[in-house]
Amino acid sequence: MMQIALAGNPNTGKSSLFNILTGSYEYVGNWTGVTIEKKVGLLKNKQGYLIDLPGIYSVNPLSKDEGVTANFLLHESFNLILNVVDASQLERNLNLSIQLLEFGKPMVIGLNMVDVASQQGMNIDINKLGSLLGVPVSPVVARTGKGVEELLHRVMGEDSEPAFPFKIDYGYKIEDAIDVLGHKLPEGLEANKRWLAIQFFEGNEVVQAYLEKYVDKDWLQDLYRKTEQGSAQKTGIQLLPQAIRQRRAEVIAGILDQAVTRTKTSELTFSDRIDRIVTNKFLGIPIFLFFMFLTFRLTFEWLGNPLSDLLDGFISGPLTDWTTAFLDQVNATAFIRACILDGIIAGVGGVIVFVPQIFILFLIISFVEDSGYMARIATVMDKLMEGIGLNGKAFIPMIIGFGCNVPGVMAARSIERPNERLLTILLTPLMSCSARLPVYVLFAGAFFAGQQSLVIFSLYLLGIVVALVLAKVFSSTILKQEGGSMFVVELPPYRIPQWQTLGRSTWEKGKGFLRKAGTFIFAGSILIWLLSYTGPGGIDVPMDDSFLAMIGGVIAPLFHPLGFGTWQSGASLITGFAAKEVVVSTMTIIYSVSDSGLGGVLMGHFTALQALSFMSFILLYIPCMATVGIIRKEVNSVKWTWFSVLYPLATAYLISLVIYQGGKLLGLG
Ligand code: GDP
Ligand code: MG
């Protein structure tokens, strides 16, 4: 069966094409760094596998995800490269195409986004481009599927190596060195020798490591140095990688000259005009904050809460009634009744009622990703982030973290420098994920009715501010980094997202929540209920004498200075480590809700100030179990994993202490 490697720059539509060609669904987002691991899918015609590689600008890896492609080329077997090229950004895209062509495998170019290119007044002579590059070029619009059949046809028919392999003359000093290195290598290598040599001279570390298996390291260094000197004498370009890139750029300019004509002179595009405003030095951050605030308004007050109330009405009304009637009919024992009504329905139902808010929030995050605004946020934040030892790119994992911290932590892979990446991973869990939302909605709804979205907005902001402050602290102490970092997020043109894509990616994000409710929270609710129903004195004990009260009571005194030193809060915090939603489940079970609703009951147990302190603590105190797991995997260090658990605890404690004690001093509680 044919193995086809799908490669191209970030954000050129690879995943869109992958989805069409394989009929599968993969995350499509309008920003760099969406696909961080290679994915494999079976072609719809069942005649081959398509391997979606992460987007890269060059085979020469700068970051961890870029290394995936270089390693893939070197170590995996495949028949053909399908190179996706963004027609509207030909110049930059061809840089990668040429490196792939030099690899010498059969290749087809999928010239994507031809719709955008023609809108911008670019006229591309497809045949000319194909003959200059020596491989078939097939125009497509991956977004709508136009041209995909022809492309697939081309791909299936293309199994021979290019008749006129593409070759750049890098000047005789470099060409000589390519030959010398080629002769030194054993016969029968998988990878093309010329390609290996060029990549090595361009500073590709993955290739260097590969070569060192066959050739002496010192000899290699020596060859590199001599070639660099020789080439510098001839061209005046001091660094060898730069000399190679320069030559490539000249060749690309020549190709574009012959194959592209412009009918319009490049004037300000629509995207440029919007960007003038939203990425403006002074307006950028206020606009982002305003957008966030609107998001919360919409998520809670305008749309989410009314829907949520309907759902709540259904669960506590008809659903409970039906279940009770059913339990009566089957003569269920008191134990089973309590387990189902006070455990499962209370615990799972208590969380499920927040489905509307969570899905609306996910819809908005998907919109931000797919419209292109995400990349602007990163740009706007860059200045600020630079001052604290990170760059704007680090903000993307954080925004993803608003949905769920787990993919947020994973998205940090697109960050090049190890210390910056570690820092981003450590701080992403401070972003308020959707699992914490139920807690806020519940408490803010009860204690700050009328200002609910403002309070929730402030909590999200608190998470961001704490993350930024700690980034500064960490980057100037334990995670020092030398030199400035580089920021290479490109600004893709704005696109109106398609409903289909939006719907799909919202569902992809949200289904995890539903699944969790059906499994984890379900089981957790039963367990918590059981702990609240039993105690040293037997079963059906008063809740204050239950095991749950004992467990919660152990840590409760610790939280006394923070304003919530009750066993109920203690128990919720412990169970909340498993998953933050469980905090609400636990509270629903503990305060077994009467007619006044959980919010009403809570008002008897907390003051507004205590509620605020509690919410802040929930926001910051600890990443959930799944997040700790993924951190462990991503940083591959027990020490840093412990750190990621302990520093938030300390921070949360401090901040809640300040809120509560400060508030009391001000006479607020
Ligand atoms: P990847 O990063 O290369 O995997 O790119 P994606 O498949 O995630 O697509 C990036 C963005 O470009 C998404 O917003 C797509 O909807 C959009 N897109 C993909 N192909 C086309 C196309 O041919 N024309 C236009 N106008 N947009 C496209
Ligand atoms: Mg992708």
Image (cartoon, rainbow, N blue to C red):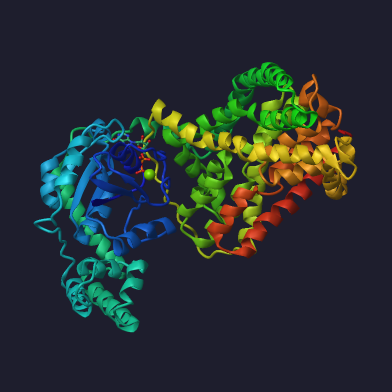
- Point out the quarter of the image occupied by ligand 2: top left
Q: Please give the name of the residue rendered at 51% of the width and 30% of the height, measured from the top-left corner.
A: 364
Q: Is residue 666 visible?
A: no
Between residue 349 and residue 546, name the one nearer to us.
546
The reply, left or right, for residue 92 in relation to residue 125 is: right
The reply, left or right, for residue 174 in relation to residue 403 is: left
Q: Please give the name of the residue rendered at 33% of the width and 71% of the height, measured from the top-left corner.
A: 210
Q: Position of residue 213 (x, y in %)?
A: 33, 77
The reply, left or right, for residue 579 in relation to residue 533 is: left
Q: Position of residue 624 (x, y in %)?
A: 65, 47
Q: Please give the name of the residue rendered at 28% of the width and 34% of the height, measured from the top-left corner.
A: 116
Q: Position of residue 385 (x, y in %)?
A: 55, 50
Q: Is residue 48 visible?
A: yes
* Relative height, residue 88 to residue 467 (above, below): above
Q: Position of residue 662 (x, y in %)?
A: 84, 41
Figure quadrant of the C terminus = top right
Between residue 297 and residue 233, name the one nearer to us.
297
Between residue 631 and residue 61, name the one nearer to us.
631
Between residue 141 and residue 493, name the one nearer to us.
141
Q: Please give the name of the residue rendered at 79% of the width and 41% of the height, measured from the top-left corner.
A: 531
Q: Quadrant of residue 187?
A: bottom left
Q: Quadrant of residue 137?
A: top left
* Relative height, residue 518 to residue 226 (above, below): above
* Relative height, residue 336 to residue 252 (above, below): above
